[in-house]
Amino acid sequence: MIVISIQIQNKTGIRCHHACMIIGEVEAFPGNRFLLEFPQGTSSLNSILDLLGLGLKFKDEAILKVSGPDERRAGKIIAKMLQDQYDCY
């Protein structure tokens, strides 16, 4: 298992469009398990609503945990997506 500390950099937080892209990428790693821990809750990143339910806002900090056969690569990609700034479409 790898553990990565992240900070949300998108000024509008994680919204539906971002969550859709993140969950889509999570699905590209079927043998891995994801857990995003935030003081207000935890998401297994199995659904868009699960991720949106955390209510992640700009500068919020969370912990991403990934375990599985491709955990390092999967963790790096998902952490980057969670931290990316999407404000400039």
Image (cartoon, rainbow, N blue to C red):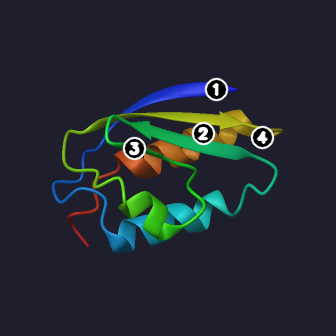
Nearest to viewer (mark 3 / mark 2)? 3
**Amino acid beneath label 2:** Gly
Quick one: label 1 or label 3, which is nearer the N terminus?
A: 1
Query: Between 35 and 3, which is closer to the camera in this rendering?
Result: 35
The foreground one among 14 and 54 is 54
The residue identified by callout 3 is 41
Distance from the alpha carbon under mark 1 to that under mark 3:
19 Å
Give the residue type at disc 1: Ile
Circles 1 and 4, Cβ within 8 Å, touching? The answer is no
Q: Position of residue 57 (x, y in %)?
A: 21, 50
Q: Residue at x 35, y 50 (%)?
A: 84
Q: CA distance from mark 3 to mark 2?
A: 19 Å
In front of the other: 52 or 15: 52
Residue 61, position as x, y percentages in the image: 30, 34
Look at the picture and state if 78 lies above or below 1.
Answer: below
Which quadrant: the N terminus?
A: top right
| Of labels 1 and 4, the one closer to you | 1
Left or right: 65 as drawn, with respect to 55: right
Q: Dot 4 corresponds to which residue? A: 70
Residue type marked 3: Gly
Q: Residue 88, located in which quarter of the rendered image?
A: bottom left
Q: In the rendered structure, which disc, 1 or 4, sits on the residue that comes first in sequence? A: 1
Q: Secondary structure at mark 2?
A: helix
Q: Nearer the viewer, mark 4 or mark 3?
A: 3
Closer to the N terminus: mark 3 or mark 2? Answer: 3
Do the numbered discs 4 and 3 sit on residues whose CB atoms are within 8 Å? no
Task: Give me the C-alpha separation between circle 1 and circle 4.
Answer: 10 Å
Q: CA distance from mark 4 to mark 3?
A: 25 Å
> Mark 1 sits on what residue?
2
Q: Is label 2 in contact with label 1 (beta carbons under 8 Å)?
A: yes
Residue 75: mark: 2
The residue at the point 57 percent across, 42 percent down is: 35
